[in-house]
Amino acid sequence: MSRLHVHPESHLVARIGWLRAAVLGANDGIVSTASLIVGVAAASAASSNILIAGVAGLVAGAMSMAAGEYVSVSSQSDTERADLARERGEHANQPDFEREELAEIYVKRGLDPTLARQVAHQLMAKDALGAHAQEELGISEITTARPIQAALTSAATFAVGAAMPLLMVLVSPPSILVPVVSIASLAFLALLGAIGARAGGAGVIKATFRVTFWGAMAMALTAGIGALVGATV
């Protein structure tokens, strides 16, 4: 039995599709909702109005994330399908050229020209379009666009992320609402950065600092604008 069957490998890049959407959704949910809450609170709004604004932000943000991810990833999917259709037509009209084109790709990667032609011939005999999709266009099963998966993942994780600062509004006294929401949201962002880094096999410290820093910047800017508007209105 082959050692590859005894010891199969599992690469983290297979998670890239849903992981990107999940981290983006959760991060946006925490940052946008916390910033909205802090900004409204800094304008001296009542606790009930702050909660209403936060809930509205959660619902609107989740729907916006779902729609945005679906539209953007669908555009990628449309482009992939168009490229595959064009490639399929080229295979039908000039198969010899396509075989040489694939062989040239392998030559540039370091194979001997004779061996490269043999590899290209065998791969195209099995799955010509699949070979060119991966080697020429960079389209594979791992990286292919999945609009529905991206939309649902982003919407769900946005809602979960947005619920965190909203929970702080419910449990914190009005007099210290802004610092409680800000500190708790930064802690949630740090946790999200660590989880995302671990899931993707990346460095935890760098990812944690990145999401926490930009979250703090967003909340500080929104709080400043909220305080300015509250003082002038």
Image (cartoon, rainbow, N blue to C red):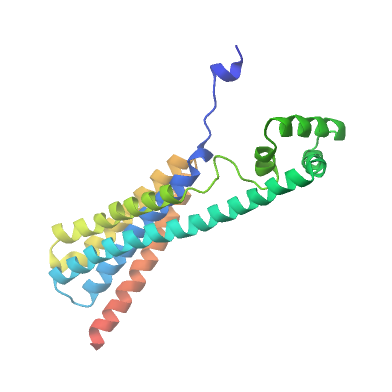
Outermost residue, bottom side? 232
| Percent of width and height locating residue 198 | 43, 40
Tell me: residue 40, above or below residue 206. Answer: below
| Residue at screen point 50% across, 44% down | 16
Image quarter of residue 217: bottom left
| Residue at screen point 52% across, 58% down | 75
Image quarter of residue 63: bottom left
| Percent of width and height locating residue 33 | 29, 63
| Residue at screen point 69% across, 30% down | 126
Is residue 106 found left or right of 169 in the rendered image? right
Q: Nearer the viewer, residue 107 or 181?
A: 107
Tell me: residue 136, above or below residue 29. Answer: above
| Percent of width and height locating residue 172 | 15, 60
User: Is residue 208 shown to the viewer in this render?
Assistant: no
Outermost residue, top side? 1
| Percent of width and height locating residue 91 | 74, 44
| Residue at screen point 37% across, 67% down | 218
